[in-house]
Amino acid sequence: MKNSIFTLLNAVGCLILTSLVAFQWSKERGTHRITQDLRSALADSESRHTKEIKKTSALERDVAVLKEAVAATQAAAETSAKDNASHSTKAALLQTELAAALDQAKSWEASIAARDTKLKELNSELIVTRRRLDEAIVTLKAAGAR
């Protein structure tokens, strides 16, 4: 009887130990699964972190390029404004010179018209004088022929 109790107690002890081992093994498998999931999540997180760093770096380069472009555009705008002011001043000066030249041209046109009028008067007087001279020559020839 003592042997059978020990055998029974040994069998119960083995079952309890087997159950305990199975329970710990199951618990360890669950912990291992959780650890694997966490490692996978960590790898994904690191991958995303690396991608975000690259993206941030690219965006910072883009911002730097845009700042340079804005600075160049502002410089070009300032230069253009200066050139525009210079051209406006030149245009005003040329406008004044053009007005003076037009006034001078009108003065010359008036002088030319006065000269043309004087030439026509002198031409008319010359034609009248020429006729009188021709008449005088004809009269002298007629008087010389007599």
Image: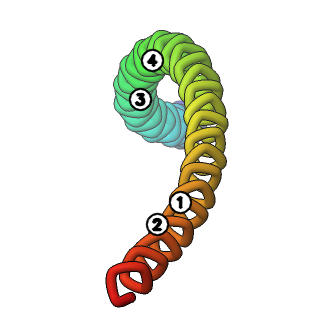
- Indicate which label's residue lies in the foreground, 4 or 3: 4
At 60% from the left and 63% from the top, the residue drawn is 128
Q: Give the amino acid at mark 1.
A: Thr
- SS for callout 2: helix
**Disc 1: which residue:** 129
Work out whether mark 1 precedes mark 3 in sequence or the reverse, and give the earlier one.
3
The mark closer to the camera, 4 or 1, is: 1
In primary-sequence order, the first of circles 4 and 1 is 4
Query: How has the structure been colored for display?
Result: rainbow
Of residues 61 and 38, which is closer to you in this image?
A: 61
Q: Say which residue label 3 marks.
A: 62
In the rendered image, which quarter is residue 112 located in? top right
To which quarter of the image does residue 91 belong? top right
Q: Residues within 10 Å of mark 3 (few under 14, many from 20)?
A: few
User: Which amino acid type corresponds to the residue marked 4 in the rendered image?
Assistant: Asp
Residue in the foreground of this view, choosing between 58 and 16: 58
Q: Residue 133 got which mark?
A: 2
Q: Are marks 2 and 3 in contact (CB under 8 Å)?
A: no
Give the distance between the C-alpha atoms of the residues marked 2 and 3, in whole angstroms.
100 Å
Answer whether labels 1 and 2 touch (C-beta < 8 Å): yes
In the depicted structure, whether residue 131 falls above or below residue 32: below
Which structural element holds mark 1?
Answer: helix
Which residue is drawn at the image coordinates 46% and 35% (left, top)?
Answer: 48
- Looking at the rendered image, the disc whose residue lies closer to the viewer, 2 or 4, is 2
Q: Amino acid at mark 2?
A: Leu
The quadrant of the picture occupied by the C terminus is bottom left
The answer for how far apart the CA atoms under marks 4 and 1 are is: 66 Å
Residue 21 shows in the view: no
Q: Where does residue 11 sit, x and y in percent of width and height? A: 53, 43
Residue 139 visible here? yes
- Going from N to C along the chain, the mark reached first, 2 or 4, is 4
Image quadrant in which the N terminus is located: top right
